[in-house]
């Protein structure tokens, strides 16, 4: 199996630049990233646990809307190439195989912003609206 586990896009408002843009979601066994294709702001998530869970066991409601997606991937546990439930919140990413319920839970680790372009106005400080408390 390749290192690339999940690669998909989700179009929404960026938490940094606030533009409506595709958010590139990459998940591998060792790391998950969400990157804005407009401003390149990136949130990095690291693995916390892998286990077979009951539905929703690892998913805790947060103050901000979570993205719930169904994406195709090969399961590291059962080997089936099928749909996985991908839930991205401001603090966690959960990837769950629909076949065997094997779940990867990633926790937020760090974020970084691409430098502002010389000819553009700086993005400024992001207020509480766009970041997790």
Image: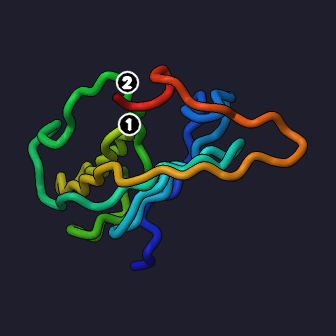
Q: Quadrant of residue 89?
A: top left
Q: Which residue is mark 2?
A: 64
Q: Residues within 10 Å of mark 2 (few under 14, many from 20)?
A: some
Query: Is 94 situated left or right of 131 in this image?
Result: left
Task: Using the numbered discs, state the Cα–Cα distance from disc 2 to disc 1 in whole angstroms.
Answer: 7 Å
Instruction: Name the side, left or right, on which 61 lies relative to 3.
Output: left
Q: Nearer the viewer, residue 29 or 41?
A: 41
Residue drawn at (66%, 32%) of the image:
124
Q: Position of residue 24 (x, y in %)?
A: 57, 49
Furthest residue to the right? 119
Secondary structure found at label 1: loop
For image coordinates 60% across by 47% down, the residue present is: 41
**Toward the viewer: 19 or 24?**
19
Judging from the image, the colouring scheme is: rainbow
x, y (%) of residue 37? 68, 46
Identify the residue at image location x=32%, y=41%.
91
First-in-chain label (2 vs 1):
2
| Residue 72 visible in the current orientation | no
Which quadrant is home to the C terminus?
top left
Taking the image as shown, residue 45 lies to the left or right of residue 12, namely: left
* Residue farthest along the bottom direction in this orientation: 1
- Pointer 2 and pointer 1: residues touching (CB < 8 Å)? yes
Picture layout, residue 118 above or below residue 66: below
Residue 15 appears in which quarter of the rendering?
top right
Q: Secondary structure at mark 2?
A: loop
Q: Which residue is mark 1?
A: 90
Instruction: Give percent across and percent down for residue 25.
Output: 51, 51
Residue at image position (58%, 43%) is 23
Q: Quadrant of residue 46?
A: bottom left
Q: Is residue 49 above or below residue 87?
A: below
């Amino acid at each position: 199996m390749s290192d690339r586990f999940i690669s998909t896009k989700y179009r929404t408002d960026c938490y940094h630049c606030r533009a409506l843009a595709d958010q590139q979601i990459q998940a591998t066994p060792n790391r998950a990233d969400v990157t804005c294709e407009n401003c390149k702001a990136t949130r990095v998530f690291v693995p916390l646990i892998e286990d077979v869970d009951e539905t929703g066991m690892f998913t805790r409601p947060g103050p901000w809307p979570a993205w719930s997606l169904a994406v195709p991937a090969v399961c590291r546990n059962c080997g089936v190439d099928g749909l996985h439930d991908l839930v991205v919140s401001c603090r966690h990413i959960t990837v769950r195989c629909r076949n065997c319920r094997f779940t990867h839970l990633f926790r937020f680790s760090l974020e970084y912003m691409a430098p502002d372009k010389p000819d553009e106005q700086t993005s400024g400080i992001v207020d509480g609206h766009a970041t997790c408390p």
